[in-house]
């Protein structure tokens, strides 16, 4: 009797332990899972839409394809037949992974690289901070440090180049109207739903080549990884029965041409002047002190050892995509220390230090998007991905969504950084050390909140693209903005003003998008 | 989560005193206890590189644990433990501003409740002494939905199935030695965020926690027979997998965590009144990986009494 109780107890405990620890062991997805789908539109005239940087789709020249009855074509068709009928497990996995909207994957790769490189340099033994060097990216601290300004600009180049590449692709698809291999030959198995679109040139080859080049320029240590990904994407088109070699090679040409245009723009957009050295930084500080020194103590980095220069003080000088200038959207000054508005905001910070609710803290962590993450812009790309899948956007529309979202968020970053270093307003814990943040203070001034500006801009663009969900995006943006208050990273006026400026920047972009021919 | 190097992994800390030793309550006896632990470090291993970080300075984790050990049978005991944990950080002084770095706020709350059974499997004479073989099995489960997304989280937020074997030899000259080791079968931890990067990006809040093992070698001596004992202990723990903290990154629940520690324990029984005991423990991290180089100090008050009349025959066979 007693012995059986003894045994039963042990068996029960072991079973309970196994259950508690293993029952929740589900999958750990490394990408957004979706079923290849039927596109909600074909946009046959998409080749006429207004590109972001190209003057028109015809900036790229693509020759007429060989006829589907020609020997060259038939040889290419034979290759696809041979490959697509007999897939290995790895090939099938690649076909499933890349799906029929490959831009989603390239954006995820960008998010992953942003996360990987979003680490601030560690101090050396003497307490100095070495800086990443683009001429020597593999020496610690590795280049780049993909902080929010770097990342929002990176996403913008990727997405804008992808959109221009899609406009050019659509133009030639419907100019030449060459059918896909599975249409030409019924024995070719097609892995995805039939969207009845011409296959020459390949949208996925164009996207892959553009992404490989843009991301390779942004993350020089990842060139091999990107080449491997691009090759897999390209091959998966043959495995899927979707494209023949000439579809792909002409897609490559478009991607390559467009990427070069954007990389040329990136070389002259002033990003190279954004991160400055200490002597120039002293000037930035002196300017702010001259303007505002009687109203607030200039922002300082509070880290130990102190980082001598904030993150990209001249990011505000980077060429924007849509706003006329940073001055046009720069908000008025924040309240002086000791003013009524300041005192209210300070009291809120002190109250939250003592009494933040569990829900407020969870909102702060959810939108934290700090070091080691894909940054706020990456977070909004994740949001956009879920919506464009649910609305079954085609690759052209997908690229457009990402392009306007990300160029607008880049403008938000540019504008916000101009404001930050123009005013150099202190973070709450600097102004009052009794204010304790939930996590580390970013290495740039407080006013206005980057999260809020990015999010306000993102909500306007996404609300324009998915109007039925505009209120949801606005709620999310407001939550992202307030998350910074809950974390005591930002004053309420940083967040509210940032959100408002973000809206304003979003409106500039939407007015451009509304005229691009897609509506 | 800017920096999350856990003081000591939850495992081993709350259940250090009793489920891993050889002491058994008789049937019907219960021992209730209240323990306090203070663990602090100002250096930690980032991968295998020991460093300081002025932004977090000294990180302190305090816990108050209420526990009981109940003799279900002479050979079967139940443990229940409920720890309340508080974390805090005292950053270093910024040499330029003369102010401390911004103090990132700590977290607090009920951590992981432990439910364990300990069984005496074998008790036999070997030479002049007694050899006891015991086993402990049970689980620890997060009680309060705390989050490892906090900068200084109170725990790893994962269920842990613990299976421990204990070999205890009492030389009957006041000297005893003990070896024990446990396998930790760990379930997922859960973040607030739904995307995170470890060595790749993950589109989920769930974190795959590597399993872990821990082991202790203990040498003890009864300074005063059945009244005052002192122990020296060597402890190790290691996760079976996980990844290193990258330079200047924060910690993460599924890091590869390793630690070797030395410690001392002392316990005084029947102090002032029968059944009342005091315990003291201290340990220090000698080497590690992705953990703090911490010093732990702790103590407890225990009271043992009869809950019901146990089996008389068992009493007689003692």
Image (cartoon, coloured by chain):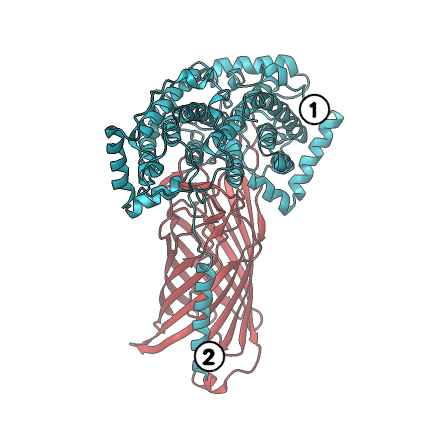
Chain colours: A cyan, B red
The residue tagged 1 is A337
At which x and y percent is residue B267?
48, 64
Residue nearest the observer in this picture, A264 or B290? A264
Neighbourhood count class around disc 1 (C-alpha, 10 Å): few under 14, some 14–19, many 20 upward: some
Residue B141 is tagged as: none
Q: Residue at x 38, y 62 (%)?
A: B182
Local secondary structure at mark 1: loop
How many labels sit on residues? 2
| Percent of width and height locating residue B207 | 45, 49
Q: Residue A518 lies in what quarter of the image?
A: top right
Query: Can residue A226 be seen at all in this image of the molecule?
Result: yes
Mark-to-mark CA distance, 2 and 1? 70 Å
Tell me residue A239's x, y (percent): 31, 40
* In the image, residue B113 above or below residue B45: below
Q: Residue at x 40, y 59 (%)?
A: B184
Whether residue A230 sits left or right of residue B157 in the image: it is left
**Quadrant location of the C terminus of chain A in the rendered image:** top right
User: Quick check: A498 left or right of A39?
Assistant: right
Q: Are marks 2 and 1 on the same chain?
A: yes
The residue lying furthest to the front in this view is: A69
Q: Which mark is residue A5?
A: 2
Q: Residue at x 56, y 19 (%)?
A: A322
In the displayed image of the protein, which residue is found farthest to the right?
Answer: A340
């Amino acid at each position: 009797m007693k012995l059986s109780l003894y045994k039963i107890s042990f068996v029960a405990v072991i079973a309970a332990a196994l259950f508690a620890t293993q029952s929740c062991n589900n999958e750990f997805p490394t990408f957004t899972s979706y079923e290849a789908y039927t596109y909600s539109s074909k946009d046959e005239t998409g080749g006429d839409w207004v590109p972001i940087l190209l003057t028109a789709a015809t900036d790229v020249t693509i020759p007429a394809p060989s006829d589907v009855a020609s020997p060259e074509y038939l040889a290419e068709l034979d290759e696809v037949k041979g490959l697509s009928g007999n897939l290995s497990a790895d090939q099938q996995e690649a076909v499933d992974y890349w799906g029929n909207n490959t831009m989603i994957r390239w954006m995820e790769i960008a998010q992953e690289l942003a996360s990987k490189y979003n680490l601030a340099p560690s101090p050396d033994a003497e307490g100095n901070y070495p800086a990443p060097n683009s001429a020597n990216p593999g020496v610690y601290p590795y280049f780049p440090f993909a902080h929010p300004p770097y990342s929002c600009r990176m996403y913008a180049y990727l997405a804008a180049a992808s959109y221009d590449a899609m406009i050019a692709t659509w133009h030639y698809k419907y100019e030449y109207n060459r059918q896909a291999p599975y249409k030409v030959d019924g024995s070719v198995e097609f892995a995805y739903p039939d969207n009845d679109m011409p296959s020459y040139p390949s949208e996925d080859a164009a996207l892959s080549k553009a992404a490989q080049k843009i991301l390779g320029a942004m993350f020089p240590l990842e060139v091999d990884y990107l080449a491997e990904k691009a090759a897999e994407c390209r091959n998966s088109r043959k495995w899927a029965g979707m494209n023949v070699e000439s579809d792909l090679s002409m897609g490559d040409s478009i991607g390559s041409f467009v990427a070069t245009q954007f990389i040329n723009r990136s070389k002259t957009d002033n990003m190279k002047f954004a991160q400055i050295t200490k002597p120039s930084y002293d000037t930035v500080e002196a300017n702010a002190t001259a303007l505002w020194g009687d109203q607030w103590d200039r922002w300082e980095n509070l880290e130990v050892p102190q980082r001598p220069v904030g993150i990209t003080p001249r990011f505000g000088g980077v060429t924007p995509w849509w706003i006329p200038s940073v001055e046009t959207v720069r908000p008025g000054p924040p309240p002086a220390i000791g003013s009524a508005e300041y005192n209210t905001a300070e009291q809120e910070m002190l109250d939250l230090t003592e009494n933040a609710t569990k829900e407020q803290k969870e909102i702060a962590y959810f939108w934290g998007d700090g070091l080691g993450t894909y940054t706020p812009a990456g977070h909004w790309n994740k949001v956009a991905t879920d919506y464009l899948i649910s609305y079954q956007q085609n690759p052209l529309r997908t690229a457009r969504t990402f392009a306007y979202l990300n160029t607008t968020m880049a403008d938000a970053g540019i504008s916000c950084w101009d404001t930050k270093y123009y005013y150099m307003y202190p973070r709450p814990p600097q102004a009052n050390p009794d204010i304790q943040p939930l996590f580390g203070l970013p290495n740039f001034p407080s006013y206005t909140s980057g999260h809020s500006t990015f999010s306000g801009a993102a909500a306007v663009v996404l609300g324009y693209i998915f109007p039925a969900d505009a209120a949801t995006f606005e709620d999310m943006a407001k939550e992202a903005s307030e998350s910074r208050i809950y974390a005591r990273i930002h004053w309420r006026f940083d967040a509210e003003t940032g959100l408002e400026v973000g809206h304003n920047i979003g409106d500039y972009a939407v007015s451009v998008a509304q005229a691009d021919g897609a509506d | 989560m800017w920096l999350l190097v856990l003081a000591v992994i939850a495992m081993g800390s709350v259940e250090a005193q009793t489920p891993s030793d050889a002491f058994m309550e008789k049937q019907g006896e219960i021992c209730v206890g209240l323990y306090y632990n203070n663990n602090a470090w100002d250096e930690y291993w980032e991968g295998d590189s020991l460093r300081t970080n002025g932004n977090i300075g000294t990180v302190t984790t305090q816990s108050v644990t209420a526990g009981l050990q109940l003799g279900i049978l002479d050979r079967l005991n139940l443990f229940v433990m409920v720890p309340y944990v508080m974390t805090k950080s005292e950053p270093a002084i910024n040499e330029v501003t003369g102010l401390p770095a911004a103090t990132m706020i700590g977290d607090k709350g009920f951590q992981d409740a432990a439910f364990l059974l300990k069984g005496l499997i074998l008790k036999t004479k070997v030479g002049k002494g007694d050899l006891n073989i015991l086993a402990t099995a049970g689980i620890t489960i997060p009680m309060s939905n705390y989050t490892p997304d906090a900068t200084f989280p109170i725990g790893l937020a994962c269920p842990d199935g613990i299976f421990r074997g204990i070999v205890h030899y009492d030389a009957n000259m006041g000297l005893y030695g003990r070896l024990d080791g446990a396998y930790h079968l760990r379930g997922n931890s859960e973040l607030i965020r739904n995307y995170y990067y470890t060595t790749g990006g993950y589109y989920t809040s769930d974190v795959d926690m590597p399993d872990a093992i821990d082991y202790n070698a203990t040498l003890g001596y009864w300074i005063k027979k059945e009244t005052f004992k002192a122990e020296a202990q060597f402890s190790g723990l290691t996760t079976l997998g996980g990844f290193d903290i990258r330079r200047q990154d924060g910690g993460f629940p599924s890091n590869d965590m390793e630690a070797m520690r030395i410690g001392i324990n002392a316990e005084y029984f029947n102090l002032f009144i029968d059944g009342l005991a005091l315990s003291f423990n201290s340990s220090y991290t000698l080497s590690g990986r992705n953990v703090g180089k911490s010093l732990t100090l702790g103590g407890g008050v225990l009271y043992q009494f009869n809950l019901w009349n146990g089996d008389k025959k068992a009493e007689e066979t003692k």
